[in-house]
Amino acid sequence: MSGESGKGVGICGRVPVDVKAAAYQAMHKKQNPIPPIDHTVPNVEAQRIEQEGRDLPDMAMEDWTESTRSEELMVVNEAGGSRGSQGQGGYLLDMLDTENWTQSRTMEGIALIDHVRVHEEQGTDVSDGGVENLTDNLTRGVSIVTEESRVSEGLDAHKAKGEALLTTKLVGQASDRNKETIWSWLMMDDVLSVGIYGMGGVGKTSLATQIHNQLLQRPSSFNYVSWVTVSQNFTISKLQYLIAKAINLDLSNEEDEKKRAAKLSKALVAKGKSVLILDDLWNHFLLEMVGIPVAVNACKLILTSRSLEVCRRMGCQNSIKVELLTKEEAWTLFVEKLGHYDKLSPEVADIAKSVAAECACLPLGIIAMAGSMREVNDLYEWRNALTELKQSEVGVEDMEPEVFHILRFSYIHLNDSALQQCLLYCAFFPEDFTVDREDLIGYLIDEGIIQPMKSRQAEYDRGQAMLNKLENACLLESFFSNEKYRIFKMHDLIRDMALQKLREKSPIIVEVGEQLKELPDESEWKEEVVRVSLMENHVKEIPSGCSPMCPKLSTLFLSLNFELEMIADSFFKHLQGLRVLNLSCTAIRELPSSFSDLVNLTALYLRTCEKLRYIPSLAKLRELRKLDLRYTALEELPQGMEMLSNLRYPFFFSLSLFTFFLTVKYLDQNSLI
């Protein structure tokens, strides 16, 4: 009755599912119950929406719910088109504490618009490029899943055939819940493929290994379980040989790819119900080209990837995201891997907590950093490590092999210059800074990263699609704020990697949230500098005599310097290449006359400059396309507005200013988009 060979009476196909489940539990009282085949994960968010009488957005539901509460375990049901909430994640937890959302830093006074996500499919070719996958190469004390680390284990009649793999202990409250969710999917006849996705180093392989070994150890309806590490530099031929090796099939004498696929498919079908796990998949491919017969009575597929897009393109019916650790779990893991926390002095212990916090809840970063500080008791070494983490973005010498190699490779694998630039641009914002999607898209348009299109809406749609891809690749973390605005933030280690890539490309100055009271020394303002971000500091004035010689500077962010009251006329003298200037959320009362000579300026942000009463003539700024004057003290428009023939996106808080602007003769109703 239980559906298990060798137990009780003979198996009968007519036994109801719930009876089989009850019989199974009776034989395995200590085991977790297996959900019935018709069990589905409830779509909690959809139920709540329905109760409140609101309509779901006109889009695939899994795309819409992908950015709901950050503390929830995100589950995608591709087959049913829905996503359910499974509670708090563990190894697997999102680093953003929703209780602190109200304290999240974001641009003050911004009018936000909640646009729905645009899902854009993009095919990706199988890459032959080569960088060794380091996802599982954790430092000291962590088992590595490789061909060499597989061990034989005695198999009896009640175990699926396959080899158990060495693995690491999962950390976090979500570990068991994740395993149970995936296990329940595997028990469903109509679920043939499962995807596990998340950023590099978050624990996807460890979770998949646990599932693999659980399939071997626990009685099930599967005859065979196979594991193949795909990695980035795979080809169809290489993947065929890897799978053949895993199932003891010799394809060495077959040179034709299609014939290999046929033989491989035949061999997998002959094994009956089986599970094939493909770990670290970077690109999608056609299953039939390889020879993987995903079917009810043949092979079920589990894959891990850093991209939800790959899971979708591979046809995964259910996908689950592996989230970051909580702060408490991150600290517990750090102490465990450090190994000698109890021997540290109280002062060193406090610094150790700060060092662990810099790893930003990413298991791979935590393990790597703890390993590098093992057996270190000296106060000065710990203090230096913390300084390097803060100033040098994670200390490349220690972290490159374990973390940055993975993160850099994720960046390279985007294979799209605009996507790469978009990701790097996010690093100009402060650490742990939540950014509204609409605002970022506006910047990307201003910078030319999003190329001009037929309409503003088309440009914003393109931006939403780009951010969706970065989110699906687990390079950005997306949420809904308490006000239901769509916001995102960048993981600290990914931001550090992005800053390094930016500095490799061209000179930049990024000193955000550093409590600066004055601008960096002029010696840092090199002639080759192209972008400067000094957001969220305490600069009170830019004094006369400060005149950086930066003719190539195109972007300058001085926003969120709430105490900045004065900018000397000398400051803009040699910045005439400036294209984007953001002075939002400052206390300036007027702009200097030299501002009028910024002839290449395309975007000017003066939002929430509540004391601003005077702007010099804009007549020479004929390239200006965006002008944001919301929440200023201006009582009349600046002179020269009639000369701004390219102005397309004016923003005014005052109705009188906007009405006056509309009366300017050179603008007709078709000028505004």
Image (cartoon, rainbow, N blue to C red):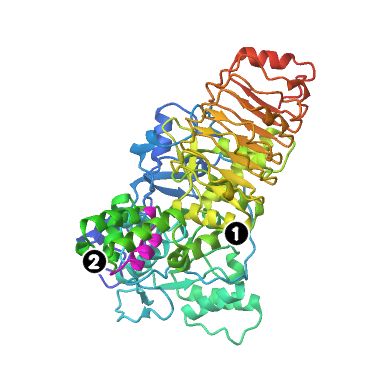
Residue 365: x, y in percent? 40, 60
Question: Picture quarter containing residue 668?
Answer: top right
In magenta, the rendered stretch is 358-375
Question: Picture quarter containing residue 290?
Answer: bottom right
Q: Residue furthest bottom?
A: 253
Specify the label residue 504 is tagged with: 1
Residue 586: x, y in percent? 52, 29
Residue 250: x, y in percent? 53, 85
1 or 38, nearer to the observer: 38
Whole-angstrom CA distance, mark 1 to mark 2, is: 37 Å
Question: Picture quarter containing residue 159?
Answer: bottom left
Residue 16 within the segment the image draws in magenta: no
Question: Is 319 drawn above or below residue 597 in the view shown?
Answer: below
Residue 363 within the segment the image draws in magenta: yes
Identify the residue at horizontal 34%, vertical 58% (top origin).
383
Front of the two marks 1 and 2? 1
Kind of residue at badge 2: His
Residue 83: x, y in percent? 44, 45
Identify the residue at horizontal 31%, vertical 64% (top origin).
3
Q: Secondary structure at mark 1?
A: helix
Check disc 2 and report the residue beneath it: 340
484 or 446, nearer to the observer: 446
Kind of residue at badge 1: Glu
